[in-house]
Image (tube, rainbow, N blue to C red):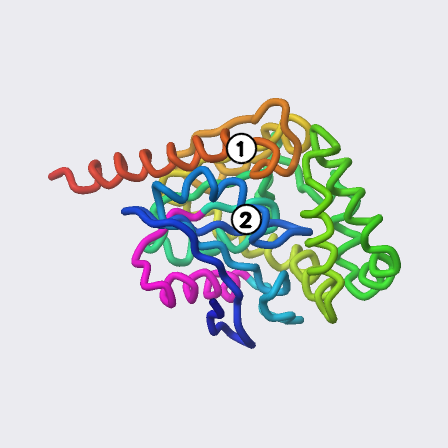
Amino acid sequence: MRIPVQGGNLFAVEIGSGPETVLLLHGWPQTHREWLPLANLLSDEMRLIMPDLRGCGESLKAYDGYDAATLADDVLAVLDYCDVDRAHIVAHDIGGGSAYAFAHLHQDRAASLTLFETPLWGVTSEDVPHLPDLFWHLRFHSEVDLAAALIGSNLPLYLDHFFSDFAFDARAIPADDRAAYVRSYAASGALRASLMHYQAIPKLSEQFASFSNMKLDLPVQAYGSEAVMGEYVVKAARLVARQVEGGVIETCGHWIPEERPEAAARIIRESIAMAAHHRKIEKKPK
């Protein structure tokens, strides 16, 4: 399906049915396709909506609209189009920017927030570093025109680097999935548009640092992987939300939905259970 948003349309896939709706926001350099192994485990239990982010996959190749408000509006447009009042928001990697912006700006529409290997730009402490200081590619990608020119000259090799080196097992992302992602990012304007998520990091850092002064009051689960982000994700989440559980997924790299889909499915089920408990507490007489 195609969903109207500022500047164009988002492409989204819907699978499954059930009393709860889960919105899944992918990372880079991927598309909604990354969630399919997870969907195979959950589609009998819940409704799953998987959009391609602004600038990625089959969605609009926009060169603007990567601020917090617009990213949140994209998520809101998906829920409104699909007639969903409240959804569980699940994010991986750069999908976390849209997820956190939405949870902060439209908290009444988010039942829970689940973060896998997700950066929270600008949210730092003594224990939570500024990620562009740790990962070289974050600053490189923010130089959009230069990065697009250099990466585009050998896109398959560059993406293979990420899929192999950021995995616990270099074979975690199958060859047919890698080829599909290369086709998506090789489309006209696609690579440059996707890199706009990185160019937006300084602005999002300012916005998210400000957002963190008012902590989220909804259940949050936050997990990093043993091979990449470790405890960063749960520590960062505790700076933006009151009710946080999480930790580190062992024998896993950055690609949690594909490397450990059973663990990811269990965590999403736990998020739904946490949200149900949270709703019961909210309804108790005071």
At 58% from the left edge and 42% from the top edge, which residue is drawn?
118
Is 76 included in the stretch rendered in magenta? yes
Number of other residues with Cα within 10 Å of mark 2, as a class: few under 14, some 14 to 19, many 20 or more: many
- 111 vs 54: above or below: above
Task: Give the left or right position of residue 161, taking residue 32 as reference.
Answer: right
Could you tell me the amino acid type at mark 2?
Gly
Q: Secondary structure at mark 1?
A: strand
Number of other residues with Cα within 10 Å of mark 1, as a class: few under 14, some 14 to 19, many 20 or more: many
Q: Between 239 and 272, which is closer to the camera in this rendering?
A: 272
Q: Which mark is residue 96?
A: 2
Q: Residue furthest top?
A: 250
Q: Which mark is residue 223?
A: 1
At 81% from the left edge and 66% from the top edge, which residue is drawn?
145
Magenta-highlighted stretch: main secondary structure?
Answer: helix
Q: Between 1 and 129, which is closer to the camera in this rendering?
A: 1
Q: Between 271 and 18, which is closer to the camera in this rendering?
A: 18
Q: Secondary structure at mark 2?
A: helix
Gap between marks 2 and 1 measured at Cα: 12 Å
Q: Which residues are magenta?
A: 68-89
The spot of residue 211 in percent (x, y) is 48, 52
Which of the image's four quarters has the C terminus?
top left
- 88 vs 182: above or below: above
Task: Give the left or right position of residue 175, taking residue 250 as reference.
Answer: right
Could you tell me the amino acid type at mark 1?
Tyr
- 75 vs 43: above or below: below
Is 200 included in the stretch rendered in magenta? no
At 75% from the left edge and 41% from the top edge, which residue is drawn?
135
The spot of residue 46 in percent (x, y) is 35, 45
Which of the 4 quarters of the picture holds residue 236?
A: top right
N-term-proximal mark, 2 vs 1: 2
Which of the 4 quarters of the picture holds residue 260?
A: top right
The spot of residue 196 in percent (x, y) is 68, 62
